[in-house]
């Protein structure tokens, strides 16, 4: 037997449904805010360095051959008006015959740029430990955090990483460039 549905019963059911929908909508996180994050990348002209004693092309005088293997991280909201880019840098090094210690420290940089304009640049050390006389080793930085304003201009910027090259090393890289 089917019960008759009155107008007031329909109104109550509709009201209950609307309240449930509004309650569920209040529980959802809603649209996530837009994050305008700078892109983190390796500067290709500075991702590789060969250090030696004497001629750089002479394998017998090579001290170290090092590369930046990658950057990995993420961008999150930081406070009410900023974003935070947190990332780590991976390195690989091969010992050269002229390396006399079991470790070597090389300088690398982190620079915030937009086009050809450099806003900030800092140089840091990375140490490669060739434990037990190993021929190859890796290194990873501790997490690096860069805070930027959460505005469209930040998304047009890049955070570039690379080895800090000497003038001679830079000139050699530029001679090899196509």
Image (cartoon, rainbow, N blue to C red):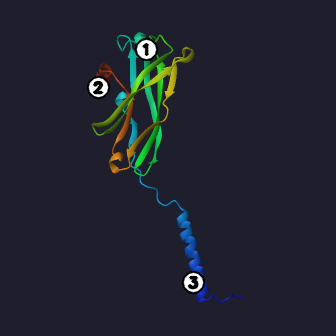
Residue that carries the numbered disc 3 in the rendered image: 11
Among the 4 quarters of the image, the one containing residue 64: top left
Identify the residue shown where x is 27% and y is 37%. 117
Identify the residue shown where x is 56% and y is 68%. 23
Identify the residue shown where x is 34% and y is 23%. 165
Precedes in sequence: disc 1 or disc 3 = 3
Residue that carries the numbered disc 2 in the rendered image: 174
Coordinates of residue 79 in the picture (x, y in percent) = 44, 49
What numbered label is drawn on residue 41? none
Q: In the image, 93: left or right of 162?
A: right
Q: Viewer-nearest of labels 1 and 3?
A: 3
**Is residue 171 among the parts visible in the rendering?**
yes
Quarter of the picture holding the N terminus: bottom right
Q: In the image, 32: left or right of 159?
A: right
Which structural element holds mark 2? helix
Q: In this rendered view, identify the residue nearer to me: 23 or 94.
A: 23
Identify the residue shown where x is 65% and y is 89%. 4
What numbered label is drawn on residue 63? 1
Disc 1: CA contacts within 10 A as few (<14), some (14-19) or many (>=20)? many
């Amino acid at each position: 037997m089917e019960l008759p549905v009155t107008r007031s019963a329909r109104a109550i059911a509709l009201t209950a449904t609307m309240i449930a929908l509004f309650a569920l909508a209040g529980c959802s996180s809603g649209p996530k805010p837009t994050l305008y994050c700078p892109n983190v990348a390796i500067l290709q002209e500075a991702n590789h360095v060969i250090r030696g004693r004497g001629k750089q092309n002479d394998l017998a005088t090579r001290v170290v051959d090092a590369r930046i293997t990658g950057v990995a991280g993420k961008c999150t909201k930081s406070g009410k008006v900023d974003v935070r880019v947190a990332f780590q840098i991976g390195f690989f090094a091969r010992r050269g015959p002229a390396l006399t210690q079991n470790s070597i420290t090389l300088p690398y940089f982190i620079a915030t740029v937009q086009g050809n304009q450099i806003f900030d640049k800092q140089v840091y050390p990375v140490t490669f430990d060739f434990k037990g006389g190993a021929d190859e080793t890796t290194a990873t930085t501790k997490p690096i955090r860069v805070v930027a304003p959460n505005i469209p201009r930040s998304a047009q910027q890049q955070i570039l990483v690379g080895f800090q090259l000497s003038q001679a090393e830079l000139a050699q890289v530029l001679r090899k460039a196509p």
